[in-house]
Amino acid sequence: MNPKIERTPPKARKILKSIVFLSLSLHCLNAPSIARAGGAQAGGEAAPSTQPGEIYAGIELTTEGVRAIALRISRTEEDSGLKLVYSENIRLALVRAGDGQLAPQAVKEVAQTVLKLLTRLRQQSQAPPERVFLIASSELGVDRPEALVKAISDATGKSLTFLDSETEIQLSVVGTISRLWKVGDTQIDNRNSSALIEINGDRTLGGYQLLRYPRDAAPRYDFVTMGIPHGDADAFRQALRREREGKPGFVNRKRVYLTGSVPWAMATLLSPEDQQTFVSLTSEDIEFFAERAARAPRELLNPNLSSIRDRDLRQKAESDLQAVKSVFTPQQLAAGAEALRTVASEFEWRGKQIWFARFGHFGRLLSYVRLQAEK
């Protein structure tokens, strides 16, 4: 079978702009199921189910790991909606060789990981092969990695679709931020007053949904997105300033949802006992995190867990801390924390509601799989 590199279908990008009433965020899914199955190296615990509904599943490749989910989608009047029945997140680095290409050993490891997850999806969630979709981040697809595509095709018989950065962000916004937010007895349009920021070790992504009012047409939702590579600190700050000038929603939105490896590390290190789906943070927390990462990174990476009395919770916290240490060196942690502090400063987060979305790394894949099921 000849490997085939696929890009995000234009139809998928158009569909995204029509799913404004789709409650597909992490708020609406079975978060406890994610928590049980979504550890740093955890295997899914979901057993084969006899409940009604169609199973759709997906596997996503990024530069920082491979993740998988399975959704049960019911279409009957008595039981309509979706439920997460399996999830797994395996952290590994797709290392590039000196020529800039993906290292052969990394390609082999990723292909083996995808095959392992594909097997688990079929066995544990009974996902039909034709309803399992493979996607990869725009960062992986930027140099058309034929070796990676071929390795996965040879191992699984399936093709790999590379997302473009704009679609990545749109999927993440819909998959992470709930459509509604309750204020007292009133529900407001949460996505129209919130922004999503994803900060990883090498780039920052962001986006928000915007309600537009054309003169000669009905109101419609659109997306505003950004993507900035990390590198020179001054260039990064200038790029953020250009984004805020042309996209004011990044500054004036009242709520900010954080995803990515850097916010994950911050929440894990500062509040290891807090395992909620959404962890409340402040701009002062971000400032403290950046200062500690710069001045005492080794102390930051080894917080005292003696105050956590619950045995299971403490074991989970210990596991999370080990995962952070396996991903970040002290130098990388300091650089990531500084990038986060810079974003918070330039986008004026002081006094805003800031949430770390613990399972936000599944948001993009959740949205993509649901879109395939809707076709």
Image (tube, rainbow, N blue to C red):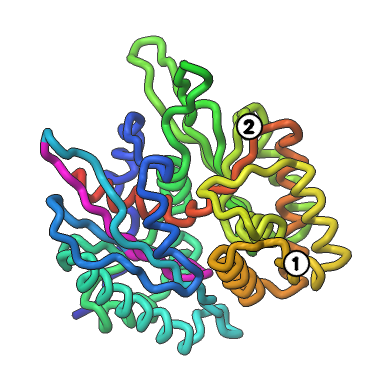
Query: In the image shown, does 244 or 321 lie closer to the viewer?
Result: 321
Point out the tag, 2 or 1, that comes first from the N-terminus. 2
- Is any atom of residue 229 visible in this view? no
- What are the residue bounds of the magenta stretch? 59-76
Whether residue 168 appears in magenta in the rendering, the answer is no
Q: Mark 1 points at which residue?
A: 303
x, y percentage for residue 249? 60, 30
* 3 sits left or right of 41 in the view: left
Which residue is rendered at x = 74% and y = 58% of the image? 337
Q: Name the residue under label 2.
A: 246
Note whether 201 is above or below 8 in the view shown. Answer: below
x, y percentage for residue 117? 32, 74
* 148 sits left or right of 350 in the view: left
User: Callout 2: helix, strand or loop?
Assistant: helix
Q: Quadrant of residue 302?
A: bottom right
x, y percentage for residue 235? 75, 52
